[in-house]
Image (tube, rainbow, N blue to C red):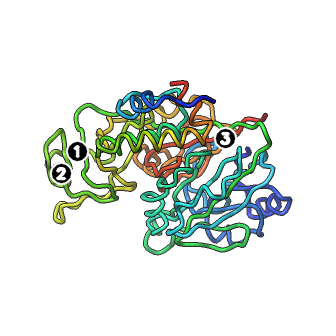
Amino acid sequence: MSTIPSAKLKALLTSNSDLSKASLGTRIMLTRMRLEVQNNPASIDAVVSELQQTTDTKPQLAADLANI
Amino acid sequence: MKNELLSVAEAAERIQSGDVLVVAGSSNLMAQLPTGKWIGGSTAYFVTENGGAVVQDKLFCTTIDDATDATVRVVSPEEVATISKGYKAGGFTVILVPAMTDAHIRFALDSANDADLFDQPLVGWVTGVHLDKLGSDASVVVDGSTGAKLENAAVLLHVELPAGSSVDFDIVNIFSQGEEMSVVFSETGFTARTAKVNGVEVNLAQYLTDNAIDTRLPLVANYAGSMVNVSVQTVDVADGRVDFYAPIVAGMEYKLAAPQPDYAAAFANSIGEAGVGQYSCNCILNYLYGDLEGKKTGGFTGPVTFGEIAYILLNQTLVKLDVKAA
């Protein structure tokens, strides 16, 4: 599976959009990451990088996010 | 999966035949079961085929007949961030945790620090006792592989499924976010003293009391489209604190739920007659506040619990899991 562009991940992390097509686990995990960014905006690059690494190793998560 | 109320002898027969089971009921009854591939948790309350009921002479058994194997594992409060270490690829894990213990608290606060926690469905519940026996009986979990009864640990059942199986896992929340009360906390935890309510910093206990807020309604957070509840346990104005049954999360916007006039009808509307053959649990607060004794809530049957787990700790929610064969 191709890597999800970091710009897309950044947009996901800085929005409040519903992810109704994603699995429950993806919704919860992404919300926790969004909150981390909201509580500490300076962490955005680190959280994007963390999410990128996570999607690289978890095909189900990558598929979930690719379909959003 | 098969969901049944069984006698001790019937449950024992299943276990001895090698079936994989999740058992709910009296700790005294579970103590009579043989060792095998099962885990158990204490509760006296159930949603049965005939509606909500207190059952103390039988055990509610979910037989996971799709399982090709299962491993029972106990984790201490300090080890809750290692839950995923036992995941079996393509399977799912059931977790039971005793109420109001370090294991309960540490699970709620620490388990999601494990980045692999979300790799497969993690379903479960917080065990309890009959409300008449609060303070005298202990909430327990049982490691069925040894028969050990545990009062301060989480017990896990890591289930293996045939290749190509899929697991449908979600929550059913009959509550929605109301429009009148937005709450944001500055610290994560089971207790809050202050919060921003509609943008204004207040003592939360005083605010809830002064405004006659119905604390049977949960605070509802929107997790990217999934509504997640946290329920109020106690409001102590004298001490200026509010305790919750699950952690409130710093920075998350919660909204007081819109009133729910008929819990049983709301469940029926949400889930119809679905539920037969699925694993599920429903919250004791729904049972009590919704007066569910004797009332049916669709086709879902299962234990009534003191907190529900769908990766994280939830309140006032039905959690459901279904296995689809390859």
- Residue B251 numbered tag: none
- B262 and B317: which is toward the camera: B317
Mark 3 surroundings: few (<14), some (14-19) or many (≥20) residues within 10 A: many
Compared to residue A5, the image places residue B117 above or below, namely below
The alpha-carbon separation of the residues under discs 3 and 1 comes to 36 Å
User: On the rendered image, what quadrant is the N terminus of chain B found in?
Assistant: top right
**Residue of label 1:** B213
**Residue of label 2:** B209
Query: Dots 2 and 1: beta carbons under 8 Å?
Result: yes
Query: Dots 3 and 1: beta carbons under 8 Å?
Result: no
> Is residue B278 shown to the viewer in this render?
yes
- Residue B278 numbered tag: 3
User: Tag 2, which chain?
Assistant: B
Mark 2 surroundings: few (<14), some (14-19) or many (≥20) residues within 10 A: some
At label 1, the amino acid type is Ile
The alpha-carbon separation of the residues under discs 2 and 3 comes to 40 Å
Tell me the element at label 2. Answer: helix
At label 2, the amino acid type is Thr
User: Tag 3, which chain?
Assistant: B
Compared to residue B155, the image places residue B261 above or below, namely above
Whole-percent x, y for residue B238 in the image: 16, 64
Relative placement, left or right, of B168 versus A55 is right
Relative placement, left or right, of B286 versus B184 is right
- B126 and A42: which is toward the camera: A42
In this view, the mark in front (3 or 1) = 3
User: Tag 1, which chain?
Assistant: B
